[in-house]
């Protein structure tokens, strides 16, 4: 599903965010990418959805070599990868429903399909009854669920979440992780970037640890190793 | 995906852009209108000045009065000679009777002159030739041509109304206003370009969150750029409409005064604008739209990194 082959990423002038990364993620996996702040986790996620380009190496998503993806193809890639951030990135002037349907509108989806899909994903994240609310009328956990719903509208094969619980308290964080597990059980490959030790340890899924831009461990049913 | 649906959504985003920055949109359109109105004022002056010049030039004539005893055949041969020049528009032969009648007409109120004419008992005037040229600049040429000994010995006097000064004045006024007008129009165009650039820049800035999310969720590129392109087009189109309304409103409002002042030249100019409205205003819209599209493209390149 996802394969990094000897990938390096340098930021000018002299930052090596990633160095010789080799990583293979199989379809349907739930992988946690962990490491200290500044270790290169976000960079790895950005390479995945072509927000950044690898300096060296090859990145394949599905059957698609995106190492030198054409700018005009990036929207196509983004519709195959759901993306979730720490800061939700919701539009404050739009309701929950509009925030989610926005993703379909700007991809040119038919109105009828939008009316079908949006309630479905809102149901998955458990926000059916709050679809008319504005983001400020929701808790942090609920806002993050809206952003997950938005990430799901294109029925992506991959969901990338960069510190999705970073702004949430423990209880809401736990809810979000449960939601990601549920989505993974439906068959979506989940890449979770986090530095939350408790979450990783409770998950009992594959853990890839990065330090200074290199993968230092990769363990099935792993634990958070580095303190 | 249906084309209409996309256009409708683009339109929605565009109108959001425009109304969220209402004053900016208002100022942009106003500057556009000012630019267009200035350009049309210059254009109008130009067309009007040409029409006035033409009218004046048509009135300019040079009259050769022959000696009373000169035979008609000599005068008509001079007429033929003059007609041979390409600069000459027309040569009118006026027989001596008519010259006398015209003279009497002109001096109807002057008893002394009329009675002294009566005393003379015979027509003191010879035949005349009235020459009109295509251009007042050919006057000198015609006068020199008549200095040939063949005819000059029969000519009593030549007389021309001195419109030259008037014409020069109109011409120099027109040249000056044209330079001034073009300068003003260029200045306004420059301001218009800067304004549209800034408007699009602000629109991009105001929508930076939306744009970031659009990119995130895989929006089509033209969906991100479309609203700004459409916005620029819309400003151009709306201001063209307003300008056309202003131009014809001004024409209507000034109809009476201007006809008094310019005579036929005014109506001719208005007609010129009306008959060529599509070309004149269409060209202006096309130019404005092109300029603002280029500027928008430039602003997007600079601020809408993809
Ligand atoms: N756009 C950028 N330009 C330059 N350096 C960057 C940029 N983004 C990240 N970095 C650097 O790359 C390294 C890895 O950053 P990042 O991937 O954000 O780490 P993490 O997400 O693990 O905290 C850090 O040293 C960071 O300062
Ligand atoms: Mg990070």
Image: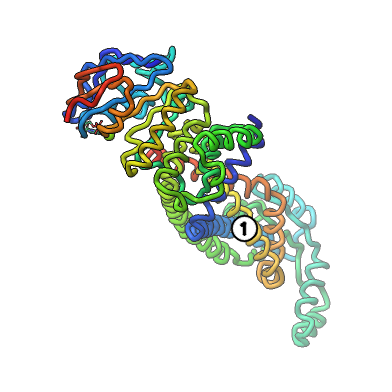
Q: Residue at x 57, y 48 (%)?
A: B234
Q: Could one spot residue B193 in this view of the protein?
A: no
Relative to B124, B178 lies left or right: left
Q: Which residue is drawn at 52% across and 45% down?
A: A96
Q: Considering the image in quadrants, where does the C terminus of chain B appear?
A: top left
Picture coordinates of residue B26, whole percent (x, y) = 52, 59
Q: Which residue is drawn at 25% across and 32% down?
A: A197
- The front one of B276 and B56 is B276
Relative to A85, B280 lies left or right: right
Q: How crowded is mark 1: few (under 14 residues within 10 Å), some or many (20 or more)?
A: some
Indicate whether A205 appears above or below A37: above
- For the image shown, how many numbered marks are present on the structure? 1
Q: Could one spot residue A66 in this view of the protein?
A: yes
Indicate whether B93 appears above or below A59: below
Taking the image as four quarters, which one is ligand 2 found in?
top left
Q: Residue at x 55, y 39 (%)?
A: A101
Indicate whether B213 appears above or below A132: above
Relative to B36, B188 lies left or right: left
- The front one of B106 and B243 is B243
Q: Name the residue under label 1.
A: B242
Structure colour scheme: rainbow
Picture quadrant where residue A68 is located: top left
Picture quadrant where residue B265 is located: bottom right
Secondary structure found at label 1 = helix
Relative to A201, B194 lies left or right: right
- The front one of B150 and B237 is B237
The subunit carrying tag 1 is: B
Q: Considering the image in quadrants, where does the N terminus of chain B appear?
A: top right
Picture coordinates of residue A74, whole percent (x, y) = 43, 26
Picture coordinates of residue B229, whole percent (x, y) = 52, 41
């Amino acid at each position: 599903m996802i394969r990094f082959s000897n990938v390096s990423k340098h930021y000018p002038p002299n930052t090596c965010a990633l160095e010789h990364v080799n990583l293979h993620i199989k379809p349907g996996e739930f992988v946690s990418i962990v490491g200290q702040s500044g270790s290169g986790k976000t960079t790895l996620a950005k390479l995945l959805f072509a927000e950044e380009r690898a300096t060296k190496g090859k990145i394949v998503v599905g059957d698609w070599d995106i190492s030198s993806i054409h700018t005009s193809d990036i929207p196509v890639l983004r519709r195959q990868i759901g993306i979730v951030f720490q800061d939700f990135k919701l539009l404050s002037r739009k309701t929950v429903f509009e925030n989610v349907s926005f993703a379909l509108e700007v991809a040119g989806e038919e109105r009828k399909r939008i009316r079908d899909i949006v309630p479905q994903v809102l149901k998955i994240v458990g926000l059916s009854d709050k679809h008319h609310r504005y983001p400020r009328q929701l808790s942090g956990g609920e806002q993050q669920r809206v952003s997950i719903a938005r990430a799901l509208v294109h029925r992506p094969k991959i969901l990338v979440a960069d510190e999705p619980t970073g702004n949430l308290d423990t209880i809401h964080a736990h809810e979000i992780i449960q939601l990601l597990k549920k989505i993974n059980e439906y068959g979506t490959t989940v890449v979770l970037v986090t530095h939350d030790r408790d979450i990783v340890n409770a998950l009992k899924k594959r853990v890839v640890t990065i330090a200074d831009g290199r993968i230092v461990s990769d363990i099935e049913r792993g634990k958070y190793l580095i303190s | 995906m249906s084309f209409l649906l996309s256009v409708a959504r683009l339109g929605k985003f565009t109108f959001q852009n425009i109304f969220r920055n209402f004053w900016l949109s208002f100022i942009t359109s106003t500057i556009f209108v000012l630019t267009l109105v200035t350009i049309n004022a210059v254009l109008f002056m130009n067309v009007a000045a040409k029409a006035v010049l033409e009218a004046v030039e048509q009135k300019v004539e040079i009259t050769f009065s022959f000696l009373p005893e000169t035979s008609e055949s000599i005068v008509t041969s001079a007429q033929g000679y003059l007609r041979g020049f390409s600069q000459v528009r027309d040569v009118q032969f006026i027989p001596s009777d008519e010259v006398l009648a015209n003279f009497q007409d002109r001096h109807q109120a002057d008893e002394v002159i009329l009675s002294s004419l009566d005393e003379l008992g015979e027509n003191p005037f010879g035949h005349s030739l009235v020459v009109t040229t295509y251009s007042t600049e050919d006057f000198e040429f015609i006068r020199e041509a008549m200095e040939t000994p063949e005819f000059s010995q029969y000519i009593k006097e030549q007389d021309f109304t001195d419109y030259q000064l008037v014409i020069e004045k109109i011409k120099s006024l027109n040249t000056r206003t044209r330079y001034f007008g073009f300068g003003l129009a260029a200045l306004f165009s420059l301001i218009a370009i800067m304004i549209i650039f800034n408007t699009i820049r602000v629109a991009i800035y105001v929508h930076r969150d939306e744009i970031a999310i659009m990119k995130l969720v895989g929006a089509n590129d033209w969906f991100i750029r479309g609203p700004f392109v459409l916005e620029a087009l819309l400003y151009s189109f709306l201001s063209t409409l307003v300008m056309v309304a202003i131009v014809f409103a001004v024409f209507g409002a000034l109809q009476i005064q201007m006809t008094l002042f310019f005579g036929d030249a005014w109506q001719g100019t208005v007609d010129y604008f009306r008959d060529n409205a599509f070309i004149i205003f269409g060209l202006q819209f096309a130019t404005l739209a092109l300029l603002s599209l280029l500027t928008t493209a430039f602003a997007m390149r600079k601020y809408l990194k993809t």
